[in-house]
Amino acid sequence: MVDLTGPITSSSVAPSWVQQSNGIQQKLKVLKKLIAELKKYHDEALLVTFNRNSGAQDAEMLTLEVQQRFKQLHAEIRTTGPNNDAEIQKRVQQQLAQALFKLSLEFRREEMRFLNKVEEQMGMERGSSIGLIEEEEGTW
């Protein structure tokens, strides 16, 4: 049986890169929730209402927050420090970068969907006013 009541030694504490990786994973979960919330704001903003600005303003603020968090997480992933377990750390860093990339794709798809719907409501051709090409399934 292991004594968990004794003093914590340096050998029992996870390396800083492991702690940093765990923190990044938690932030990725928060970011995923924010993207889901943003989708709700986008859906509300697309509804025909008398007060179109409220949902659009909320969506814009949340979009900026999501973009900022992407930048912060990207920087954090790049700075997971060197250590003795370099190969393991490298794989963890790659997994975190891949998870961030997938969330980035999800975010961009949602933005594209929203902008195309806005153009559709305004009677414009998809991608005409914002310089984006039409979204095609499977091109991401």
Image (tube, grey):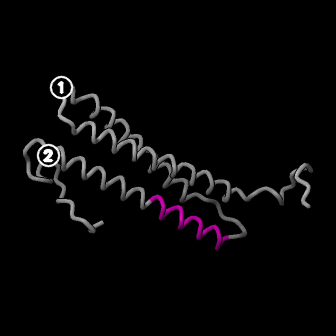
Q: Which residue is mark 2?
A: 119
Element class at badge 2: helix
Element class at badge 1: loop
- Mark 1 neighbour density, 10 Å: few (under 14) some (14–19) many (20 or more): few
| Secondary structure mainly formed by the magenta segment | helix
Query: Could you say where residue 18 lies in the image, as x and y percent from the top left?
Result: 67, 59
Figure quadrant of the N terminus = bottom right
The image quadrant that residue 19 belongs to is bottom right
Task: Tell me: 44 left or right of 1.
Answer: left
Disc 2 residue type (three-letter): Glu
At x 82%, y 58%, the residue is: 12
Q: Which residue is mark 1?
A: 50
- Mark 2 neighbour density, 10 Å: few (under 14) some (14–19) many (20 or more): some
Magenta highlight range: 86-100
Compared to residue 3, the image places residue 136 above or below, namely below
Compared to residue 139, the image places residue 77 above or below, namely above
Query: Could you say where residue 64 lies in the image, as x and y percent from the top left?
Result: 37, 41
Disc 1 residue type (three-letter): Phe
Mark 1 / mark 2, whichever is N-terminal: 1
At x 51%, y 52%, the residue is: 28
At x 66%, y 64%, the residue is: 82
At x 25%, y 36%, the residue is: 45
Query: Could you say where residue 58 lies in the image, as x and y percent from the top left?
Result: 33, 33
Compared to residue 136, the image places residue 62 above or below, namely above
Task: Tell me: 133 left or right of 107.
Answer: left
Q: Are marks 1 and 2 in contact (CB under 8 Å)?
A: no
